[in-house]
Image (cartoon, coloured by chain):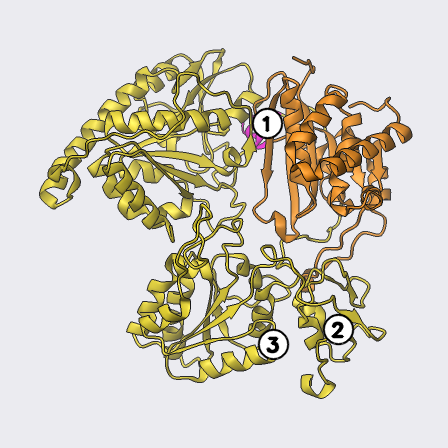
Chain colours: A orange, B yellow
Amino acid sequence: MNELERPRNVFLTGVGGHGVLAVSRVIAEAALARGFDVRRSEVHGMSQRGGSVVSQVRYGTRVHSPLIARGAADILVSLEMLEALRHLHALRSDGILLANEQRITPAPVGELTVAYPDDPRGVCEERVGRAIFLPALDIARELGEEKAANMVMLGAYSVLAPEIPETTWLETIATAFRPRFRELNVAAFGTGREVVLRTAGEGITP
Amino acid sequence: APNEKVALEVACGVSLGGGRALCAMKHVGVNVAADPFFSASYSGVGGGLILVSADDPAMHSSQNEQDNRHLARAAKVALLEPSDSQEAMDFVALGFELSERFDTPVMLRVTTRTCHSMSPVELDPNTRYEPVLRPGYERNFRKNVLLPANARARHEAVEERLALLEEFGNSERSINRIEWGDRTIGVITSGIAYQYVREVLPKASVLKLGLTHPLPRQLIREFGAGVDELYVVEELDPFLEEQVRALGLHPAGKEIFPITGELDPDRVAKGFGIEPAGAGIEPVEGSLPLRPPVLCAGCGHRGVFYTLSRMGVAVTGDIGCYTLGSLPPLESMDACLCMGASVGMAQGMEIALRAAGDTRPVVGVIGDSTFVHSGITGLINTVYNGSSGTLLLLDNGTTAMTGHQEHPGTGVTAEGDSAIALDYVAVCHAIGVRRVREADPYDLEALESAIREELAADEPSVIVCRAVCRLVDRTPIADPAELEIECPGCGTCFELGCPALDGSSGQAVIDPAVCSGCALCVQLCPFCGLRIHGHEAVTPESVS
């Protein structure tokens, strides 16, 4: 049984079809495998139709609420830049933002259409003291499958979660998906992990 | 099953025959199943019978946020409210036991947040997780045939049963349990609200109710007497609170906790007057682009709603992906009420408009699974009462919005076995609709003329628009559309609201990875600048 002083609050967001829910599921299962009490929440009725998707994972010695209080997330994992902006206030003031630099322009909504922000990264950096940006889509493309961008982000997250060892992540990924995707997922996870270790170093902890 | 009423009736039959049955549906589905539900309460059960009502506080994907605990009380059945995944499982076993022991159907009421969350579950070594049968069915006329004379006696039995259940609820302290702590604050709660209370007030005394109908009044009095200040924390209606007040207790409840939407740790903390522990990051000011769910690229519904939006017709819609046709830029749906309502509402609206001298045509729009659910009966009424309305049946071959479940029209059972597929055209003919035709939803011109012809006819008509859901069959319809000229940015194609078309630069930019080649934009481009290989381009004259 692992110890955490207080529950770890992870807020995840992205766009429908992005694989946000797969990331939150692996985090929840890996935490469970390490003996933590876990709560995971998601609402995904429209997730396949390009809408905003949110999932929350909390783990620790004892956890009650599946929802994170506002401004209490330790880490915000966003698979898309606009969604990072939309949910920045989920983070506590010294929380860490982990964002995929990909931009997905929402479908036009007639008169309600608002332009995509010019510099989402700048806005994030202005507000969040500790922000890590990854070209997860490019990394996944190099590995031969765009859809693995979510696993790149999972690998990046794993560096910020030293309470869960690498072997547990790899075992969880191995059982969480169909065998034919295993090699790809493990490679994407490993690359995401490596990039953060190289650029941000192990010094970053929540 | 095609709808919740039928599903519950099958479950009641299983129970009558001695099997255990669990029938799960959304909160609004219980309205459809209310008829068998209320009467099954009088008959009681053979094998255990559980109705799972999945309520949706905050309406994450529903048309209302009714609190179905009222329905359990109105039907006089036992009501269980789990607060996490472990209890969701344990209460199924408990529900079957209670159902058989007290001869009652049981409502297991869950909410979005208990359903769409995960927490660890341990299997109980003493529970058998397998189907249970009670062999030896015997006919019982007085119990199972609800003639008035029998039903009167059964109502007496129902009241006796509730008294026994209350006694059980008072004494079974693992299901309804007091967690004594700081006695200055006592909180009565149930379901997911319990988790928020524990999170926000870890030291308070809590009465955690699992069996919330009938309420354990003795236990509540005992708890109330043991604390200084009493609170009731529950999602949606003051269901517990009003009954607690009827005992002469004075809890604080809905005056400090919201009656609308779902609770969360913030709303519960605010009710108790607790300030957030630390300030979070300030939200980004100004409006960000919205990202509502949209019809997929290549969705067969898009052409239908685009066409309707240009015809000046009133459209009664229905429940499904195609409800997205009500949103900008398509905005071509006047009403969406409940499953199947499009058909009856079109008929009624036509009567009212004509009486007011309004000649606007009324079109009903319904999906295939919703038509099977409860559109057919509406269509019978339309024909029977001599309406001349037009119904568009959008057949995407699945139940798309809820996750691609099979239904009686797909020819495959919920378990994946092959079945006889309902023939919509034959059904419409059999009902008495003589004008039934098919129209290709990807051919805008043909679709519009089909709708115009049927609206002009002086008798009821049905137009079936077939296009398999893009999430079921992702095979490209054709090569992606391409721009062959410098786009002048007229914005005509943006009116389709297609996610493959990015218009944020003022010019059309097609994402070839998203475009399915449905060619709706190609048909609309007034400059013939959009092309698809093999698709005949429109001429500027034909679109003027």
Label 3, label 1: how many angstroms apart (C-alpha)? 48 Å
Instruction: Judge the density around disc 3: few (<14), some (14-19), many (≥20) Cα neighbours within 10 Å.
Output: some
User: What predominant SS class does the magenta segment belong to?
Assistant: helix
Q: Are marks 3 and 2 in contact (CB under 8 Å)?
A: no
Looking at the rendered structure, the kind of residue marked 3 is: Leu
Residue bearing mark 2: B533
The quadrant where residue B519 appears: bottom right
Residue B185 left/right relative to B354: right
Residue B269, given in percent of the width and then of the height, sits at 58, 27
Looking at the rendered structure, the kind of residue marked 1 is: Arg
> What residue span does the magenta drawing correspond to?
B264-274
Chain under numbered label 2: B
Image mark for residue B47:
none
Residue B42, given in percent of the width and then of the height, sits at 20, 38
Instruction: Judge the density around disc 2: few (<14), some (14-19), many (≥20) Cα neighbours within 10 Å.
Output: few
Q: Residue at x 85, y 74 (%)?
A: B486
Residue B496 left/right relative to B324: right
Looking at the rendered structure, the kind of residue marked 2 is: His
- Tell which residue pokes out farthest to the right in this image: A199
One can see residue B328 in this view: yes
Residue B100 left/right relative to A55: left
Q: Residue at x 37, y 15 (%)?
A: B173
Label 3, label 2: how many angstroms apart (C-alpha)? 18 Å
One can see residue B281 in this view: no
Q: Residue at x 80, y 47 (%)?
A: A102
Q: Quadrant of the C terminus of chain B?
A: bottom right
Label 2, label 1: how many angstroms apart (C-alpha)? 50 Å
Residue bearing mark 3: B444
Residue bearing mark 1: A39
